[in-house]
Amino acid sequence: MNNPEPLLYEFDDFRIDAGRRLLTLRGAPVPLKPKVFETLLYLVRHQGSLLEKDELMRSIWPDTVVEENSLNQCVSTLRRALGESPGENRYIVTVPGRGYRFAAIATAIANGASKTEVRQQESARAPELATAAEGAGRGPIPQASPSLSRWVVAGALAAVLVASLWVGWRGSTGGSRTRVIWLDLDVGSEVSQPAIAPDGMTLVFVAGGRLVVRPLDQAKITTLAGTEGASSPFFSPDGQWVGYFAHHELRKVPLGGGESVMLCAAPRDRGASWAEDGRIIAALSASGELSSVPASGGGPRPFSEIKAESPGVTSHSRPHVLPGGKGVLFVAGAGVATGSLRVVPLSGSPAKTLVENSSTGRYVGGHLIFNRGVKMFSAPMDLNRLELTGTVSPLIDGVAYDHFRGADFDVSASGTLIYRRTSPTANRAVMWLDSFGLKGRVLPKPGAYTSPRMSPDGKRLALMSESELWIYELAREKMTQLTFGSEVECCPVWSPDGDYVVFRAHSGIAWTRWDGSGLLQRAPAGHGPSGTPWSFSPRGKWLAFFGSSPLTGFDLWAAPVDRATGVLQLGQPVPLLTQPGLQAAPAISPDGRWLTYASDNESGRTEVYVIPFSPQDASRQGKWPVSTDGGRAPRWSVDGGEIFFRSPDDHLMAASVTATGDSVRLGKPRVWYENRLADLGGPPNFDVAPDGKHIVAMFDSEETKPDQTHLRVLLNVNDELRRQRATRLQGKPR
């Protein structure tokens, strides 16, 4: 007979009464919604153990299908109820990409037991609980099997760490079972865009703006000469060549080293894939369609067509040729990475949509592998019919994702998967920078922060944490939550007088007073495009934002601001720049005459430009490039003499600006700070302080990094997917 669960638990000054569904603090009730209380109770009853998010969602919502955001909101609310500050893990520890763990020791008062007896028992168990907490989520490091000896050679052991997971197959059939191995590669932190050879033995990735080769069975890393400015690498079917984009050209280079060969001009860089018939399917056209390029070189020919697309689709990107030339996977979208993942036969028949809201797709072992944000999924796929034949299943959480480039992963035909791991969201330190380097912390502790924005008087910092908006008062060192359940998505912006903070909510643009007084306001439905705010004009007469358009993609807009009644109101927006592709982050200059923004309209790669800011006067013309090798999220210096922006690899860049009459002269972009900022994807990771001397920036916190490896390899993924598929089929009723 099972013992009943205890009804009472105590930790610190809190007491949980499971029978009455009540949490108290020193005897006073702490109001909790039912699902928030259930979350707390489940965490406490499994204290010291890592609880996967899927397990928590199944337990708390047993009869309902919910999104992960519901769990995140419960945990966020619970942390506030327990008095945790943003980034603090006194009671609840977030294990990035996996789940949560209750870190405190809760005393369980068993039914019929005295309080003294239970405290004595828990005191004796304290070392055991501490050990369990330290080891949660980690497993034994296995010995390599003979069939994998080629992976674990003496020269590789110094750099290839066998991860703490050895996932055995759970198939129902007997006999010899292949195991999946996770390997972490020590290749440094500033790497991106990994590609793997068809045989699964060699990696290529981008580091320092060049292509780097790493065999999996060796520790040797080799930079391919002549590949400066490289991006989006991909292998030839025989694994002897690497294709890539650089300086508006599609190029290829021998894997073993040699001269880089130009194949054709490439106005855009949206990815490419090498087919077995000697063609390269590339997203390089300025008009947005896919092109077919001979692998030996020559002019591109159209492969897909944009004109026939529905409104809202302005580009085809990230092509991937399926085995045997059965077809091509690609993403249809509106400038950013995410869109509809489609498949089209190489013969050019009409495309089919496989899944929505994805940025990268691959095929291996009878399965489609794709991402949604930082999560990867798999679904069985019929290669002949080019259709999905089963349900979608989660595969991996914590894949690095870029708002414009997509997810950083690749899969070989042999079943080896490589991906760049994302840094933990609770691992971000907010720091002061000046022209000489780091000057100290803005916030005392790291946390799950994004979108920093300084108030005009420099006394406060607005930032996001766990889908809510917070205000940090620098002099008082006090953090105050500004929004509650408002589904904040991005990008707080202060009004010039410092009274209001405007931000992007799930429903569009919203705003509230910085001190929480008054009501939260939202832009009326149908009142222009739903957008992301970025800057006010100096006197607060205009709010510049970017929003999606069904015809062109993402365009720039300005909404007139009305303060006649003392309350901020937005008028009907007017377009600033409408053209195909992505236009984003419109920052108005301090004198109100110029607008800097990011766009992929000309090169296919997101670059920073300057145009006149004249929402009511179309006579002022001109356009000047600021960045030369990619850029986004621009900000003006306080005096208007510089434009700061993010490079594609998240370095902070700056370019001087000199305005003369109705034209501007821009200096050569330079790296303003040598260390890489935190990779936040779309949200901003820096802001310019109003004193004109400092930058507030976000970095991955050194003291909380779990390790220094950022590329992870999974072996035998194809066999695992096939076995899971067979197990599911066996479980179906006949």
Image (cartoon, grey):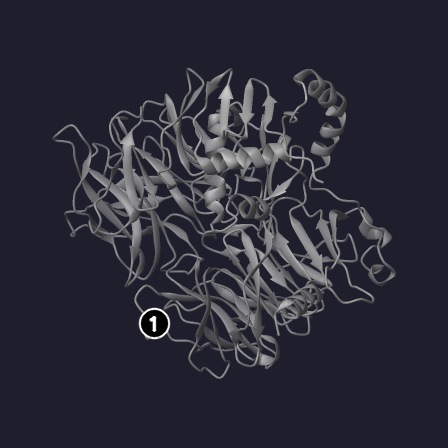
Q: Identify the residue shown where x is 34% and y is 42%.
A: 505
Q: Is residue 137 above or below residue 192?
A: above
| On-image quarter of the C terminus | bottom right
Residue 565: % across, % down: 12, 30
Residue behind mark 1? 309
| Residue 688 visible (yes or no) | no
Q: Would residue 59 appear left or right of 218 to someone viewing this image? A: left
Q: Would residue 237 appear left or right of 29 to someone viewing this image? A: right
Q: Is residue 11 above or below residue 199?
A: above
- Figure label count: 1
| On-image quarter of the N terminus | top right
Query: Callout 1: helix, strand or loop?
Result: loop
Residue 536: % across, % down: 26, 37
Task: Give the camera-side residue of 585 and 323.
Answer: 323
What is the crowding at mark 1: few (fewer than 14 residues within 10 Å), some, or many (at least 20)?
few
Q: Amino acid at mark 1?
A: Glu
Residue 503: % across, % down: 33, 38
Q: Identify the residue shown where x is 30% and y is 39%.
A: 535
Q: Is residue 602 above or below residue 562?
A: below
Task: Give the camera-side residue of 694 and 96.
Answer: 96
Q: Identify the residue shown where x is 79% and y is 45%.
A: 140
Which quadrant holds residue 460? top left
